Image (cartoon, rainbow, N blue to C red):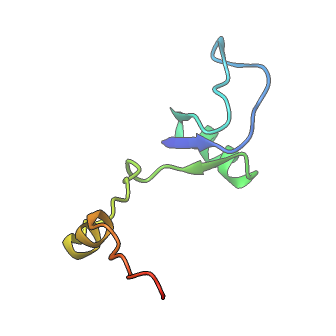
Amino acid sequence: MKIRQLIDISGTIDGTVWPGKGEVLDLADHVAADLIANGYAELVTSSPKRETAAADPAVETAAIKPAARRAPKA
């Protein structure tokens, strides 16, 4: 089961140093379930998706156009 570490855990697992906070690892289901139940990890259900903003041509054009100059007050 794939999990993401929510905390740093000291020591080793299977002879390897535990991954740090935020790292994703694949563990046996019973080990992953224990970590999740104790609040040390969360289940990774899919790859994280990056949000992208859709470009609005009107906004881009308005941002590029120079500001209109006003005539000086007399």
Q: Taking 21 as reference, is 51 above or below it?
A: below
Residue 49 horizontal side relative to residue 35, left or right? left
Question: 71 or 59, which is in the foreground?
Answer: 71
Residue with the most extreme bottom position: 74
Residue 57 horizontal side relative to residue 40, left or right? left
Q: Taking 74 as reference, is 58 above or below it?
A: above
Point out residue 72 in the picture as x, y percentages from the top left corner. Answer: 44, 81
Q: Can you tell which quarter of the image residue 20 is in?
A: top right
- At 74% from the left and 40% from the top, the residue drawn is 7
Point out residue 10 in the picture as x, y percentages from the top left corner. Answer: 79, 24
Question: 73 or 27, which is in the foreground?
Answer: 73
- At 78% from the left and 19% from the top, the residue drawn is 11
Residue with the most extreme front position: 74
Residue 16 horizontal side relative to residue 46, left or right? right
Residue with the most extreme left position: 57
- At 41% from the left and 50% from the top, the residue drawn is 48
Residue 55 horizontal side relative to residue 27, left or right? left
Image mark count: 0
Residue with the most extreme top position: 15
Question: 63 or 7, which is in the foreground?
Answer: 63
Q: Can you tell which quarter of the image residue 62 is in?
A: bottom left
Question: 21 or 45, which is in the foreground?
Answer: 21
Point out residue 67 in the picture as x, y percentages from the top left corner. Answer: 35, 72
- At 63% from the left and 38% from the top, the residue drawn is 31
Point out residue 23 in the picture as x, y percentages from the top left corner. Answer: 57, 34
